[in-house]
Image (cartoon, rainbow, N blue to C red):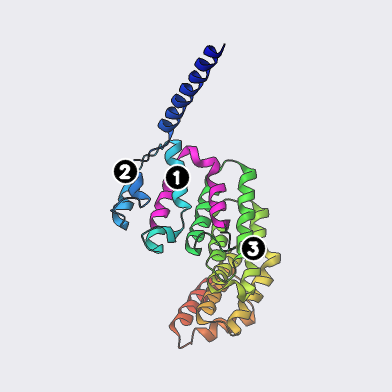
């Protein structure tokens, strides 16, 4: 009996060693091409890494895809390249992953996770530039996604990102992304009203407000009951203490909205005589659109 036990134990040990060897064999070994893309070789400069990205297959394996997702989730401080250059590489990798049919289901979730993830200290893991990229890629995914429920969840998330990132470039990107999405009338009305809100509040930042002016003006031609609110916001900016860039944008948006009253005529007439060429050019463009 003891003799049998020894053989039994030895057999188990031998089987364990074989299993361990099999496990080692199964560990993914990235190619030199992938290693260079993620910055693990001596040649970590921008150009050769981007060149390698462009050589990636349109049908990557699951391991290769996961390896690239890990790279996209890499903090810029963990890479030898500067933030701007690293984001350019990540951008091209994200395009490659978007074009993989096998990633379509998880793509939106991954982008939302990268946008939202925070480190232990409470700060966002990724810089605002890459988070902005995530918004744009989420928009591309919304256009490709076939699941209506997931599409609506993504659009809801985009709206949330507008409110939670005031003063950055993210609200502008989210507004543009939603506007470019193929959505129905209910969502378009929702976008119009959000654009009016953003256009009205300086806290969102100038870039977001300028985009909001144009989006609100564009959709106000369809939803006439909300157009008076849009015109009021535009007039308030033009007649108030807004910067020249905001006023110029608001004047252009007046032309898009297609509404004319005595005050609009006065605004256009006044700024057609402006010494600032930006205001003057915008006013002449609006005048032509409004047929004044």
Q: CA distance from mark 2 to mark 3?
A: 49 Å
Say whether disc 1 or disc 3 marks the residue closer to the N-terminus.
1
Q: Nearer the viewer, residue 99 or 257?
A: 99
**Is 147 inside the magenta-drawn segment?**
no
| Helix, strand or loop status at disc 2 | helix
* 104 lies left or right of 55: right
Which of discs 2 and 3 lies nearer the camera? The answer is 2
Q: Which mark, residue 97?
A: 1
**Quarter that holds the C terminus:** bottom right
| Mark 2, residue position | 32
Residue shown at 61% from the left, 62% from the top: 219
Q: Nearer the viewer, residue 179 or 47?
A: 47
Q: Position of residue 189 (x, y in %)?
A: 67, 59
Q: Position of residue 136 (x, y in %)?
A: 50, 56
| Mark 3 surroundings: few (<14), some (14-19) or many (≥20) residues within 10 A | many
Residue shown at 52% from the left, 20% from the top: 9
Which of discs 1 and 2 lies nearer the camera? The answer is 2
Q: Residue furthest front?
A: 2
């Amino acid at each position: 009996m003891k003799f049998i036990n020894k053989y039994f134990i030895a057999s188990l040990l031998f089987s364990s060693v074989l299993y361990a060897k099999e496990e080692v064999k199964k560990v993914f070994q990235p190619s030199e091409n992938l290693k260079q893309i993620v910055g693990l070789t001596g040649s970590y400069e921008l150009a050769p890494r981007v060149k390698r990205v462009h050589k990636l297959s349109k049908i990557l394996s699951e391991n290769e895809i996961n390896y690239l997702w890990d790279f996209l989730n890499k903090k810029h401080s963990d890479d030898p390249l500067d933030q701007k250059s690293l984001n350019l590489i990540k951008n091209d990798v994200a395009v490659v992953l978007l074009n993989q049919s096998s990633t379509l289901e998880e793509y939106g979730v991954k982008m939302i996770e990268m946008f939202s993830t925070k480190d232990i200290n409470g700060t966002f893991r990724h810089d605002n530039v890459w988070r902005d990229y995530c918004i744009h890629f989420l928009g591309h995914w919304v256009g490709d996604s076939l699941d209506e429920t997931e599409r609506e969840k993504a659009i809801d998330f985009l709206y949330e990102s507008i409110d939670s990132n005031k003063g950055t470039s993210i609200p502008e990107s989210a507004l543009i992304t939603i506007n470019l999405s193929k959505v129905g009338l209910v969502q378009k009305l929702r976008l119009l009203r959000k654009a009016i809100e953003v256009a009205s509040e300086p806290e969102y930042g100038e870039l977001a407000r300028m985009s909001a002016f144009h989006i609100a003006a564009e959709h106000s031609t369809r939803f006439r009951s909300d157009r008076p609110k849009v015109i009021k916001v535009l007039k308030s900016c033009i007649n108030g203490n807004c910067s020249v860039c905001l006023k110029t944008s608001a004047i252009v948006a007046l032309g898009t909205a297609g509404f004319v009253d005595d005050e609009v005529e006065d605004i256009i007439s006044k700024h057609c005589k402006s010494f600032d060429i930006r205001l003057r050019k915008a006013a002449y463009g609006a005048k032509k659109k409004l047929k004044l």
